[in-house]
Image (tube, grey):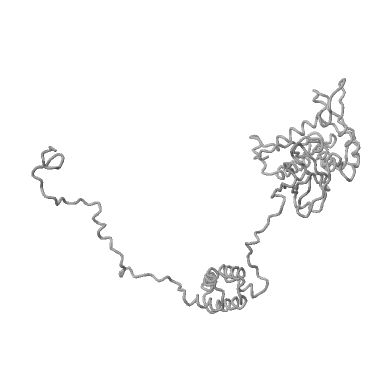
Amino acid sequence: MCGEKSVLFCGWLAWCRFRVVIPLRDKRLPTIIGALDRAFRLLGGAPTYALTDNEKTVTERHIAALPVRNPKIVSAAVYYGVTIATCVPFDPESKGGSEATVKIAKADLVPSEANLRDEYDSWEALESACVAFMDKVNNRVHTVTRRRPVDMLAEEQAKLHRIPQEPYTVAFGESRSVSWSSTIQFRGARYSVPHTLCDSRVWVRLSGDVLVIVHVGDDGPTEVARHLVVHAGQASIVDAHYPERKDPTDRQPKATNRHEEAFLAIGEGAKTWLVEAATVGARQIEPTMAQAVELCAATDRTRVDEALGLAGLAGRFGIDDLNSILTTTRREPRRANPAHSLQNGTRAWSQLGQPQSDHRPNNPNPSLNGNGNGGQP
């Protein structure tokens, strides 16, 4: 995605074949726990067992062919009432549908020559593509069950465990409050978050030299921002976190009553005049506007609009200025009669390129060097 690495978290329920695909920015433990929480909330509950690969975030090492669990993932599993189980190494049968889910998701979501999918322009585009993928595969009839996974999920939800209302936030780091300026404070520096999170609480943690910010919403924890760590007293601001701002110096007039509406309806020249008049604090703006509307009834509206535009650009905002411009401007420009022009004619140019006759006298004693001495110096 735009040169940024991403990971697809893929999971499924074995009985109903309901699949979940969530894009992640890395495979660190807090990110995985956040993905598990979102998956459980999408499923409407948690299963008794969660079968996964032998990732370092789950299995630290093996002793006597027994997996030694990461105590942090065990703590999160206990919180959700799930028992973590890992696949047997080099045994594809224990992976089953999870491998198929990954294969299908990669074929559909990862840009390649086969699916003709372009690179994703943003992280939101990748998330939208994953949601569309889940909607497609979970609403079509499965080849084995001959039923739609979304319909079977409604039956399997009765067997799932209820999950806590609040996500497991221990691994998410420290909590921070978002200020009115859509920023948080971390170690003396300011970092921006999406403006929709103002006055809410987020979680921050360091991942190398990157600050990861997570917000816990109704759908579970979601990563909302990443910043390179800056020094105390500095700020890391992302423009995309803020709504589009209008230039305060580029304000356009907007009618608030019928008199203003009638004046602005004259044209662009009227708008220009009003903007310039308001900028310099001109006097008697309203009477001049009323006079312009009256002139439109007596003369051509286009001429009045042009006169207003000229008056605005010239800085003439008096009541009599508009009449003066209308009486001195002409609809057609005055052109000089070419018959009485003082410019030199072009008749002499007709000789250009014509052979010229040689009027020099004949030389009876031509010389090679032109000195008349037969070539002698």
Q: Report which quarter residue 343 is drawn in.
A: bottom left
Q: Vertically, is 18 above or below 94?
A: below
Give percent across and percent down for residue 118: 64, 40
Quarter assignment of residue 290: bottom right
* 103 up-or-down from 250: above or below: above
Q: Residue furthest top?
A: 64
Q: How many marks?
A: 0
Q: Position of residue 175 (x, y in %)?
A: 84, 45
Residue toward you, 82 or 2: 2
Q: Is residue 334 visible?
A: yes
In the current view of this chain or complex, which residue is farthest to the left?
A: 364
**Residue 112 image offset from top left, x and y in percent:** 65, 35
236 relative to 264, above or below: above
The image position of residue 209, as x and y in percent, is 74, 38
Residue displayed at 75% across by 50% down: 194
Quadrant (top left/top right/bottom left/bottom right) for the N terminus? top right
The answer to whether residue 123 is left or right of residue 318 is right
Which quadrant does the C terminus fall into? top left
Q: Residue at x 25, y 60 (%)?
A: 347
138 vs 269, left or right, is right
